[in-house]
């Protein structure tokens, strides 16, 4: 008979659903956004790519406020938002990341690096939502230079390069944490 391994829920269903919808939506936005800017190398019509980009944009408009409200109402926003105490831990954490220190300084749910990344994404999402909707409804903003808005929207996309660091931390930190983003549970120590 198989014994049940004691475990604790660390990623509730709401977080997992929001996480994976956000990950898919943002990946789609980056891919279709860059294709819009540099089209022609795939056998796919620009009209379809535009439709996917704008639809994913509307999805982002739902996911980001729901995710934010979830963390505010459940009081877990401090787990994800970079706070002054994270700044204090950052030098020791950076030493650990660059193999100059053996142990990771004690962290709460997420390390200061992940928290800095999540916080930067929060502001980038707001910027992309505002500039994206200005581009989408450009006729209402005829007094703005759309060239500047599109430049800002394009340049801000490079801010998401930190997705690679997010995945690096996830894959190198603790396999149990990766598992919990699928199953919700982590084995008790
Ligand atoms: C993570 C979020 C987003 C990323 C990474 C992103 C990325 C991009 C990129 C790289 C471009 C090409 C810019 C260029 O042609 O130089 C673009 C264009 C555009 N995006 Fe987004 N975008 C995001 C969110 C949104 C949202 C929320 C909307 C609103 C519906 C939106 C609407 C547009 C529109 C209308 C254009 C086309 C401008 C044009 O070709 O005339 N984007 N996006
Ligand atoms: C566009 C891509 C992605 C975005 C925007 C994203 C976003 C996030 C966010 C916001 C959190 C914090 C969740 C919370 O609110 O508590 C998180 C955590 C996490 N993500 Fe992602 N993620 C992305 C891709 C991935 C991928 C590809 C993986 C798997 C390889 C992954 C695995 C995880 C794990 C395991 C955690 C928990 C980390 C920990 O406990 O230290 N993410 N992600």
Image: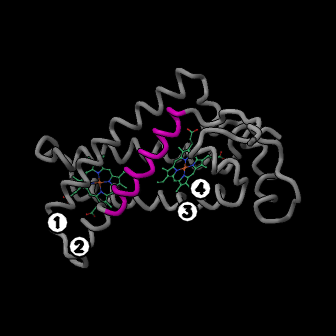
Q: Secondary structure at mark 4?
A: helix
Question: Magenta residues: mostly which secondary structure?
Answer: helix
Magenta stretch bounds: 13-31
- Residue situated furthest top in the rendering: 73
Q: Percent x, y for residue 59?
A: 31, 42
Q: Is residue 145 left or right of residue 31?
A: left
Q: Which residue is mark 2?
A: 39
Instruction: Give the Cα distance between marks 2 and 4.
Output: 28 Å
Q: Which residue is mark 3?
A: 164
- Please give the name of the residue rendered at 87% of the width and 54% of the height, measured from the top-left corner: 103
- Please give the name of the residue rendered at 66% of the width and 57% of the height, measured from the top-left corner: 169
Q: Say if disc 3 is inside 8 Å of ligand 2.
A: no
Q: Secondary structure at mark 3?
A: helix
Q: Residues within 10 Å of mark 3 (few under 14, many from 20)?
A: few
Q: Say if disc 4 is inside 8 Å of ligand 2.
A: yes
The quarter of the image holding the C terminus is top right
Q: Which residue is mark 4?
A: 166
Instruction: Give the Cα distance between marks 4 and 1.
Output: 31 Å
Instruction: Give the Cα distance between marks 3 and 1.
Output: 27 Å
Q: From the viewer's perspective, is residue 68 above or below residue 139? A: above
């Amino acid at each position: 008979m198989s014994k049940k391994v004691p475990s604790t829920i660390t990623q509730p269903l709401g977080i997992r659903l929001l996480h994976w919808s956000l990950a898919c939506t943002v990946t789609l936005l980056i891919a279709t956004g860059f294709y819009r800017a540099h089209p022609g190398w795939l056998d796919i019509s620009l009209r379809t790519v535009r439709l996917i980009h704008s639809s994913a944009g509307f999805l982002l408009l739902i996911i980001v406020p729901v995710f934010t409200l979830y963390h505010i109402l459940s009081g877990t926003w401090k787990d994800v938002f970079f706070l002054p105490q994270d700044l204090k831990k950052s030098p020791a954490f950076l030493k650990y990341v660059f193999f100059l220190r053996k142990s990771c300084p004690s962290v709460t749910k997420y390390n200061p690096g992940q928290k800095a990344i999540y916080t930067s994404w929060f502001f980038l999402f707001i910027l992309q939502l505002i500039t994206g909707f200005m581009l989408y409804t450009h006729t209402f903003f005829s007094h703005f230079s759309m060239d500047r808005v599109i430049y800002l929207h394009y340049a801000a996309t490079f801010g998401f390069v930190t997705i690679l660091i997010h995945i690096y931390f996830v894959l190198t930190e603790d396999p149990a944490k990766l598992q919990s983003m699928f199953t919700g549970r982590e084995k008790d120590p």
